[in-house]
């Protein structure tokens, strides 16, 4: 039996008095990829962002319920959000490299944490970029601006940037929806590479993508978790009528 | 009239207005430069002024202008930077920040002569600083601070929120995100704002007439001890700037070549401000390029 690394219990989230998450119960085993799917506005991003406390930045958000990371309450009064976000990294829909060199982008977290050893930093840059499957494309211009890269390369550099701080969980919110098909499939390949070493949770609108890469798939609708199961069950043999309708393209 | 012709008429009108503005600007610049540039010489730019005779220069005033500018910037930039960072990156919207913002708006629209009179009453009289560089620098700070704070806030706004999220999601603290990601990304734009506001400060007269004073005692450029009264660095000496000089000569200049000196000074002032503007564009663009591309 694998360990459960992240658990959510009866999670409610309100924007003002609008209830965006209506009691989510969802747990994640260590390693592997879980895809979150569902119609637009159903709360996928909102849910994802509760997992590394990115919703803290939005005013008037109220959260109830429990989220535990390795048994520790993420929302405990003494929880350290900075540390949490190092262990639970996030990649966004829009590639958002910093306006610095590729090298600096990747080691930024470490460097700010005080790491000075050049050899160690070089090693981390190479390892992270290799893991993100973008090393061969950028190794000859590590010291050029990351903004000069293509969108797909930028996104993989952003993934490398997250990997460099060695998180345990990686959250991705529609990481390929701003990219062309070729870049998208490169990102998918990257994620498949990483699934043995990291717990990956990815929001996607692309059902084929979910079926290609996810070990498990969770279907959300109207702020509720409708169904979660092995990906092939969700797609071939969903237990719930709404899931079936969504999968077969009847709405959303 | 169909929409195509409407469009043409509108564009034509806009071109006309823009052309008119450019024309006025060129005429003004042309006039100042044509009447002023012939007066310029090394002697004019470096020699001290003469009250009654012809052949005086604006060396002291030119030095004073730069010295005051640097002092005013040294005082106002850190405060403006801090205020802008606080307001844009940290402050929540509540009555306190609304009040601060409103205060900044009001301060930035105060006529500079009012700032000058306030400076006179407060720094010159109340704090006994006298007509001095220091009084002038404080007055300029009051004049400059709100404009600079707003321009830096705008620079911070140009850095997209996805950068802030990127920093935080990487496990950087709020301050690390601001200081190590947002500020560096905003530097080119901040620099442009600083240089442009330097141009404004450099040309400011009204705020200085009653604070830095209207006299320019000759300076001994060999003496750099700030405690000596004839030292250029002495912050307690009265210091007429170039802009104040122009105003003064035109209202009460009695030297025989007053007209020529005023034209020459105007040309120097305008050229300096033009240089500031070009420098702002050039440096801003270059820095941005260095930070963002190969
Ligand atoms: N900052 C916010 N303030 C108020 N309401 C919000 C905010 N962000 C999201 N919402 C609302 O919460 C609900 C869930 O939004 P969320 O962004 O999580 O949906 P989503 O499933 O990610 O949608 P999409 O697929 O379009 O990205 C929506 O109704 C949305 O309008
Ligand atoms: Mg979303």
Image (cartoon, rainbow, N blue to C red):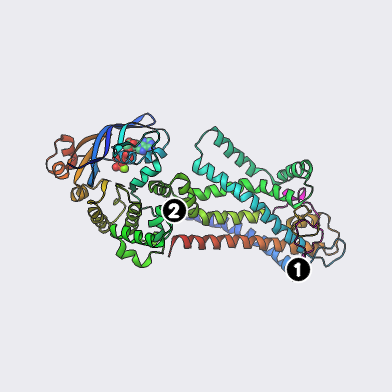
Find residue B184 and name its label: none
Residue B278, compared with residue A211, is above or below; it is below
Q: Which residue is mark 2?
A: A114
Residue A207, compared with residue A130, is above or below; it is above
Q: The numbered mark 2 sits on a residue in which chain? A: A
Which marked residue is nearer to the observer: mark 2 or mark 1? 2
Magenta extent: B202-228
Q: What residue occupies the far left of the structure in this picture?
A: A237
Q: Which residue is mark 1?
A: B39
Position in image of residue B260 (x %, y %): 79, 65
Quadrant that contains the N terminus of chain A: top left
Task: Assign the magenta stretch its main secondary structure.
Answer: loop
State left or right for residue A195 relative to residue A139: left
Secondary structure of the residue carrying tag 2 is loop
**Residue sitting at 67 percent across and 45 percent down?**
B142
Residue B204 in the magenta stretch? The answer is yes
Residue A171 in the magenta stretch? The answer is no
Position in image of residue B97 (x %, y %): 55, 37
Position in image of residue B222 (x %, y %): 77, 66
Q: Is residue B22 visible?
A: yes
Quadrant that contains the C terminus of chain A: top left
């Amino acid at each position: 039996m694998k360990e459960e690394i992240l658990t959510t219990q009866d999670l409610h989230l309100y924007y003002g008095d609008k209830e965006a998450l209506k009691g989510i119960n969802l747990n994640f085993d260590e390693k592997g990829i879980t895809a979150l799917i569902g119609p637009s506005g159903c709360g996928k991003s909102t849910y994802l962002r509760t997992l590394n406390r990115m919703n803290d930045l939005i005013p008037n958000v109220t959260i109830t319920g429990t989220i535990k990371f390795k048994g520790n309450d993420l929302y405990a009064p003494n929880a350290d959000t900075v540390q949490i976000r190092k262990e639970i990294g996030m990649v966004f829909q829009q590639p958002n490299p910093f306006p610095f060199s590729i090298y600096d982008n990747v080691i930024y977290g470490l460097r700010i944490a005080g790491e000075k050893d050049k050899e160690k930093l070089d090693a981390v840059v190479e390892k992270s970029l290799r893991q993100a499957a973008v090393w061969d494309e950028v190794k000859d211009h590590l010291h050029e601006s990351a903004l000069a890269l293509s969108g797909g390369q930028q996104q993989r550099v952003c993934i490398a940037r997250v990997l460099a701080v060695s998180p345990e969980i990686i959250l991705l919110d529609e990481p390929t929806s701003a990219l062309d098909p070729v870049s998208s499939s490169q990102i998918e390949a990257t994620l498949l590479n990483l699934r043995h070493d990291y717990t990956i949770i990815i929001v996607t609108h692309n059902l084929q993508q979910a079926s290609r890469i996810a070990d498990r798939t969770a279907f959300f609708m109207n702020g509720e978790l409708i169904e979660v199961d092995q990906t092939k069950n969700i797609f071939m043999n969903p237990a719930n009528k709404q899931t079936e309708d969504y999968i077969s393209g009847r709405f959303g | 009239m169909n929409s195509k012709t409407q469009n043409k008429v509108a564009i034509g009108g806009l071109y006309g207005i823009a052309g008119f503005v450019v024309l006025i600007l060129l005429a003004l610049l042309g006039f100042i430069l044509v009447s002023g540039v012939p007066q310029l010489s090394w002697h004019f730019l470096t020699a001290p002024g003469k009250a009654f005779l012809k052949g005086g220069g604006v060396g002291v005033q030119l030095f004073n202008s730069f010295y005051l500018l640097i002092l005013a910037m040294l005082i106002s930039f850190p405060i403006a930077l801090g205020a802008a960072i606080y307001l844009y990156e940290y402050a929540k919207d509540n009555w306190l920040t609304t009040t601060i913002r409103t205060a900044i708006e009001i301060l930035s629209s105060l006529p500079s002569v009012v700032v000058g009179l306030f400076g006179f009453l407060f720094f010159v009289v109340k704090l006994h600083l006298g007509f001095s560089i220091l009084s002038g620098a404080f007055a300029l700070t009051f004049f400059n601070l709100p404009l600079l704070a707003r321009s830096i806030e705008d620079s911070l706004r140009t850095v997209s929120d996805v950068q802030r999220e990127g920093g935080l999601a990487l496990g950087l603290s709020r301050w690390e995100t601001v200081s190590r990601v947002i500020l560096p990304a905003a530097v080119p734009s901040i620099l442009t704002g600083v240089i442009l506001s330097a141009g404004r400060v450099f040309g400011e007269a009204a705020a200085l007439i009653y604070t830095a004073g209207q006299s320019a005692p000759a300076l001994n450029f060999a003496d750099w001890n700030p405690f000596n009264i004839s030292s250029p660095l002495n912050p307690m000496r009265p210091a007429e700037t170039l802009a104040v000089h122009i105003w003064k000569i035109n209202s009460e200049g009695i030297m025989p070549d007053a007209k020529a000196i005023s034209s020459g000074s105007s040309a120097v002032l305008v050229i300096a401000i033009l240089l500031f503007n070009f420098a702002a564009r050039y440096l801003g663009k270059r820095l941005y390029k260095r930070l963002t591309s190969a």
